[in-house]
Image: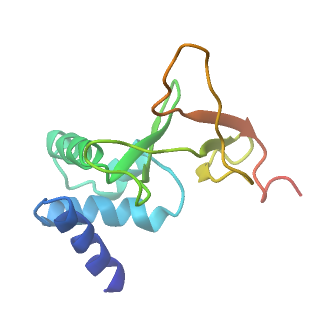
Amino acid sequence: MEVRNHLVELLRERKLKATSTRLEVLSVISDYHKAIPFSQIKNTLHDFDRVTLYRTISVLMENGIIHKALIDEKETFFALCSNSCSEDYHNHKHIHFNCSSCQFVTCVQADRPISFSILGHLIENFEIEATGLCQSCNV
């Protein structure tokens, strides 16, 4: 019940109605504890109309609640945003890590802040994707 209340509050903070569809999609993403493949969301919510699911995911992304963690040739992975994201700006200064063994995708914070500059450019946001073995597979 506490998770559901948190999700309701999250939607209200972004001035969105806490519809059952939005809550179910967010609940599935939140319960996965890693970046979740779109196919997993679709299979979990098999009673959902495909168009409704796409629209819901789009609204959640546009409002800084979820983000695309990884897009590969077969799948798109989604994850919850941090509190630093908003409807105006996604702020993802972390690494999207794709385990080459178990195929899980996770949002991982680096051991120190990631920053860099490019001469003559103003960097507002960046994304880093890394592939390798996660902690569980690297034993």
Question: Residue 88 in the image: x percent, y percent?
Answer: 27, 42
Which one is in front, 14 or 6? 14
Q: Is residue 71 above or below residue 30?
A: above
Q: Is residue 30 left or right of residue 135?
A: left
Q: Residue at x 27, y 54 (%)?
A: 46
101 lies left or right of 121: right
**Residue at 40% in and 59% down:** 29
- Residue at 28% of width from left, 57% of height from top? 45
Viewer-proximal residue among 118 and 32: 118
Residue 118 occupies which quadrant of the picture?
top right
Return the residue nearer the eye: 90 or 65. 90
The total number of labels drawn is 0
Looking at the rendered image, the quarter that the C terminus falls into is bottom right
Q: Quadrant of the N terminus?
A: bottom left
Name the residue located 17 percent from the left edge and 42 percent from the top edge: 55
Up/down of 17 relative to 110, above or below: below
Q: Position of residue 73 (x, y in %)?
A: 52, 23
Nearest the camera: 47 or 96?
Answer: 96
Q: Quarter of the image holding residue 7?
A: bottom left
Above/below status of 34 relative to 115: below
Q: Residue furthest top?
A: 120
